[in-house]
């Protein structure tokens, strides 16, 4: 996108409910119960835990880090919001249950009337998408933000796939470019096990967006065309474990942020790197995931760059607990929270956690 096109976009920005003011008492953690997909058990036909987002919130409440009153309630992205990135033709195609069944990899959806598919499957994904857009603005205002959902990195403006129906990462960045003064460069650090081909296709010719993608190249999507957008590409071997993985996270995230200083970091923190994940093919421990997130947040904090985290893929029941533990560790390290400040070392939570392992195979693709 040229700067001329961007300026035209700023002049024609639509009215949105996603950029409203948020009370100062609220932590910049975004969630809504509507994130969770439950409908006649159909959600169980995909390995993705379609209720993991609510479980993360439950664990954070148990640890008394959050309450219903101090987190931000996500709003559903409207069609006008989605049209900032998506084509009208693509959004119209989502009115066909066959298309949604293909994108979400839940074949029985093809037999349901589309109004049910919209209500039970796409509305939760639109609400998560709205949450990512809201979290982008909050990150700029507060220095950090976490959308407990989102991270639909296989969806581009005109094509969905891998359980990703809306391009929330692209949308969050485009909203910031169009609406927030001083935000003109973004870096995406995509550490999900899968290549983030959706946002890569969207930003292929946009020099304002620097993409670092670290992934298993032997699994879905294998999108060679989209790889052209990756400025720092790190391809991992099958079964990569903590030591090698964390070394590469540290070296390459530092390198990416040293190469171009962005105004915002969008961190796609997929947990499908976990050992035993049926789709990711990597062997990182729960402790490794927690340490990974700490490395990325510490790099952002050290440079004073706002960071937005989305949770993306992760296909084991235990991932919700790991995400919650990672958020708690970030708080204990002073990297998030009401009075976030830079700290060194690892918290007792990180020090005491033990790794678990397992293995499985699957025909499904991924977030």
Image (cartoon, grey):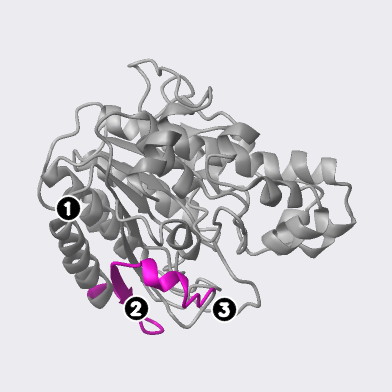
Instruction: Specify whether residue 85 is painted magenta.
Output: no
| Comes first in the chain, label 1 or label 3 | 1
Residue 304: x and y in percent read 15, 40
Give me the C-alpha separation between circle 2 and circle 3: 21 Å
Lateral position of residue 326 relative to residue 364, left or right: left
Residue 283 against residue 118 in the figure, above or below = below
Residue labelled with disc 2: 235
Task: Describe the element under mark 1 as helix, strand or loop.
Answer: loop
Q: Nearer the viewer, residue 68 or 262?
A: 262
The Cα atoms of the two marked residues, 2 and 1, are separated by 27 Å
The residue shown at (12%, 52%) is: 345
Q: Position of residue 308 (x, y in %)?
A: 34, 42
- 97 sits to left or right of 81: right
- Residue 224 on the magenta span: yes
**Element type at mark 2:** strand
Mark 1 neighbour class, 10 Å CA radius: few under 14, some 14 to 19, many 20 or more: some
**Can residue 347 be seen by looking at this rendering?**
no
Residue at the disc numbered 3: 360
């Amino acid at each position: 996108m040229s700067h001329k096109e961007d300026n035209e976009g700023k002049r024609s920005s639509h009215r949105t409910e996603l950029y409203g003011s948020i009370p100062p008492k609220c932590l910049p953690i975004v969630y809504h119960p509507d994130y969770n997909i439950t409908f006649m058990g159909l959600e169980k036909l995909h390995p993705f835990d379609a209720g993991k987002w609510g479980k993360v919130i439950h664990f954070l409440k148990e640890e008394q880090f959050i309450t219903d009153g101090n987190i931000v309630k996500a709003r559903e992205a409207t069609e006008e919001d989605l049209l900032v990135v998506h084509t009208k033709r693509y959004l119209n195609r989502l009115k066909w249950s066959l298309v949604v069944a293909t994108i979400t990899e839940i074949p029985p959806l093809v037999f349901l009337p589309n109004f049910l598919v919209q209500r039970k499957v796409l509305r939760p994904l639109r609400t998560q998408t709205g949450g990512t857009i809201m979290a982008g603005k909050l990150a700029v205002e507060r220095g950090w933000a976490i959308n407990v959902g989102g991270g639909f990195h296989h969806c581009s403006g005109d094509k969905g796939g891998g359980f990703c129906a809306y391009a929330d990462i692209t949308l969050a960045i485009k909203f910031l470019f169009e609406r927030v003064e001083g935000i003109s460069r973004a870096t995406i650090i995509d550490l999900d096990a899968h290549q983030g081909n959706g946002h890569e296709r969207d930003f292929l010719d946009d020099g304002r967006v620097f993409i670092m993608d670290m992934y298993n190249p032997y699994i879905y999507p294998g999108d060679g065309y989209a790889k052209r957008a990756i400025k720092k590409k790190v391809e991992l071997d099958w079964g990569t474990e903590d030591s090698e993985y964390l070394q590469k996270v540290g070296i390459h995230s530092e390198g990416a942020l040293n190469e171009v200083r962005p105004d915002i970091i969008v961190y796609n923190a997929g947990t499908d790197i976990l050992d035993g994940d049926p789709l990711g093919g990597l062997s990182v421990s729960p402790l490794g995931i927690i340490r990974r997130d700490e490395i990325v947040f510490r790099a952002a904090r050290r440079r004073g760059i706002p960071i937005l985290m989305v949770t993306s893929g992760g296909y084991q029941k235990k991932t919700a607990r790991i995400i919650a533990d990672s958020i708690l560790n970030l708080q204990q390290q002073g990297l998030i929270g009401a009075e976030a400040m830079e700290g060194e070392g690892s918290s007792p939570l990180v020090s005491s956690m033990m790794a678990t392992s397992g293995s499985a195979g699957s025909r499904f693709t991924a977030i």
